[in-house]
Image: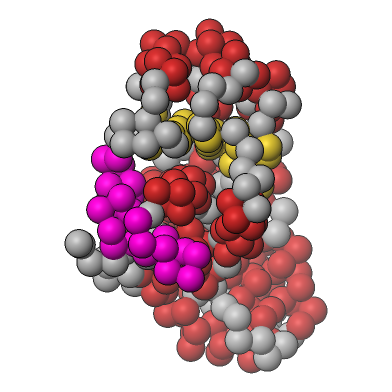
Amino acid sequence: MTAAVKNPAVTKQPAVIERFQQMIENRHLAHAYLLTGASGTGKKEVARWVAERLFCQNLQDGMPCGKCEECHRISTGQHPDVVEIEPDGQSIKVDQVRFLKAEFSKSGVEGNRKVFIIDQAHLMTTSAANSLLKFIEEPAGNVTAFLLTESKNLILPTIMSRTEIIELKPLQKSQLVAELTADGEVTESTAHLLVRLTSDREEMQSLLENNWIEDAHKALEKWFGAVTKGDMSAFVDVQTRIIGLAKDREHQAIVLDMMMLYAMDLLALKFGQADLTYLTDQAALRQVAEQTMVSQLLKVSDLLLPLRGKLKQNLNFQGIVEKVTIELCDIFKMRG
């Protein structure tokens, strides 16, 4: 018997877990579910939890124990009767679904029950989706299938109409911060910034690559420090540091969001609120907030909040940032 491993779904999606618990206890488990939610919300963990609940050899108060051989094999993706498929390259291909259908038609290797998990189901090719449709229409045996997707709108309507749809709620920011900092590689301040920018775990990982988020924070901290002094060296920062970080449209949007969050922090400090984004910049931001009139801070917000929208209008990123830098310097020069 291995050490107990608690499935993260229990804390990520307690309401969904309770719902599945009731369905299993009342023998109302459907044959196919579409689990939809942003990356990191626990779709696969929920599907595996249901499998653990069905196969566990040693339920504890009706919950999977997390330490028996069945639970361990499911949590590591090695159970013969819990089959998972994911995209092969950019899509889930028809041959993968044919393999799955062949598995559907077999009896369970170690019992009557089988569970199938199709990750990123929206990436099924049309032929793969059509191949799967017959099983969903006419399920064979004691089988439960889970289709996982970040957007149910990308699933064929014919498949969606034959599944029970369960939407997973975004995680609380405190949960995301705890997850990001668990291994000690991400600082609390960086994690706090990330969860303000996105709730998508894949996007967070992308921003962490090559220390991009830390470099962007340092560049913008220097830029905003100059701006709040009315110092036009901030204009040089745009050209020498910020433009280089904004390598594509996605990163440009993140940079503009980070600028906007500085305005939100200044207003929060001005009105005595403690929920800030930039934890390591608090002292400097507090001083700026104390020395700046509310009317001026509102002008700062009016400039920074619409920036992402301007990018969507296909305005030039460098032009947007240079213009707002000049306008912000003018506001802070008049601070009194």
Is 247 left or right of 196, judged from the image as shown? Answer: left
Quarter of the rendering containing residue 325: bottom right
Main SS of the magenta segment?
loop
Is 276 left or right of 309, judged from the image as shown? Answer: left
Q: Is residue 335 above or below residue 128?
A: below
Quadrant including the C terminus: bottom right
| Residue 26 in the image, given as x and y percentages of width and height | 65, 53
Q: Nearer the viewer, residue 82 or 313?
A: 82
Residue shown at 61% from the left, 43% from the top: 29
The residue lying furthest to the top in this view is 127
The residue lying furthest to the front in this view is 111
Q: Nearer the viewer, residue 292 or 266?
A: 266
Q: Is residue 126 above or below residue 232?
A: above
| Residue 71 in the image, given as x and y percentages of width and height | 33, 53
Q: How is the image coloured?
A: secondary structure
Residue shown at 63% from the left, 27% from the top: 154
Is 317 left or right of 211, judged from the image as shown? Answer: right
Q: Is residue 52 above or below residue 91?
A: below
Residue shown at 66% from the left, 45% from the top: 28
- Magenta range: 57-79
Q: Does 77 lie within the magenta span?
A: yes
| Residue 13 in the image, given as x and y percentages of width and height | 56, 60
